[in-house]
Image: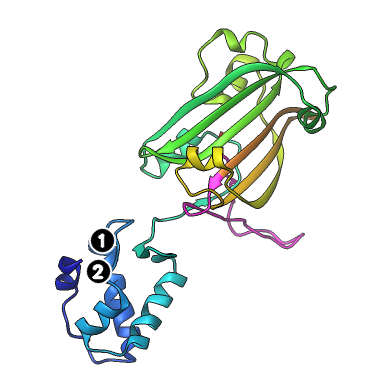
Amino acid sequence: MPDLLRGLGTVLDGKGAKHAQLRELLRAYILQHAEPGTAIPSERKLTEHFGVARMTVRHAIDALVAEEVLERIVGLGTFVAHTKLDLQMKLTSYSEEMHRRGMVPDARVLSFEQIAATPLIARELQIDQGVPVVRFRRQLLADHEPMSVDENFIPAHRVPGILDDDPPTSLYNVLSEKYGLVMEWGEDTVEATAASPSIARLLNVEMGAPLLKIQRHAYVARAMIDYSVSYYRADRYKLWVPLQRPGIRTPRTYTAKRFS
């Protein structure tokens, strides 16, 4: 913490409101030198260091929190925020998306098995209760940090022999290359939820922490092939949804992203 204060210097440039000067000074230093998760000095220490009013410091920090440069954790302090990945809906692989972002993807298989469809799974897949389905549950990581927990359910008759091989690194690639099941379209339901004890452990967050829950129904033509439920850390993702007025031609091509 003292090193960070020394790196910041002590003099504001005298141009504009002091809280705006302090905000830009903090922002520049954070973006160039501070790692995500680094604690910043307390308001009291910053007040003493720069010789300004505490309200000036608070305004500067509030602005950086609003911009998601900093994040406050109740009872712990204020920290340099992790960059949130823009979560766009798309029917491609998690590995491809993480490589595109310059991150190292990984996955830990939690289950890869055949089960009988529960009433919930039967309803979501539009099959009879008790029909065999393949359940594929994974913890997805990037740069060794847990990012999401994904669970897929596929009618077993669609993927004969899939359990004879090792769990796939990319489920959708196997469905396409081995079974000719190329996902053509899907429907997503996105909602906020709180981390249960089991999900919290897998995502390395506190129980009750905010998560993004995404349920997907993926289709080949009119046949539903995959029902999935994913839990994303809300502190690492933000949802990005392009909008367009019906009948208006878009000036750019949007591709919706999905981690599979």
Q: Main secondary structure of the magenta part?
A: loop
Q: Is residue 248 magenta?
A: yes
Q: Nearer the viewer, residue 121 or 93?
A: 121
Q: Is residue 154 left or right of residue 233?
A: right
Q: Which residue has dot 1 on it?
A: 34
- Spatial separation of the CA atoms under disc 2 and disc 1: 7 Å
Labels 2 & 1 near each other (Cβ < 8 A): yes
- Tell me which amino acid carries mark 1: Ala
Precedes in sequence: disc 2 or disc 1: 2
Where residue 240 sits in the image (x, y, percent)? 57, 56
Q: Can residue 259 be spotted in the picture?
A: no
Q: Which residue has dot 2 on it?
A: 29
Where residue 59 sits in the image (x, y, percent)? 40, 83
Q: How is the image coloured?
A: rainbow
Residue 177 sits above or below residue 56 on the image: above
Q: Residue at x 53, y 29 (%)?
A: 138
Residue 128 sits above or below residue 77 on the image: above
> Which residues are the magenta region?
232-259
Q: Secondary structure at mark 1?
A: loop
Q: Residue furthest right?
A: 128
Where residue 225 sits in the image (x, y, percent)? 72, 26
Q: How many marks?
A: 2
Where residue 40 sits in the image (x, y, percent)? 29, 67
Q: Is residue 235 magenta?
A: yes
Q: Is residue 58 left or right of residue 127?
A: left
Please state, as top left, top right, bottom left or bottom right, where the N terminus lies in the image: bottom left
Q: Is residue 78 left or right of residue 125?
A: left
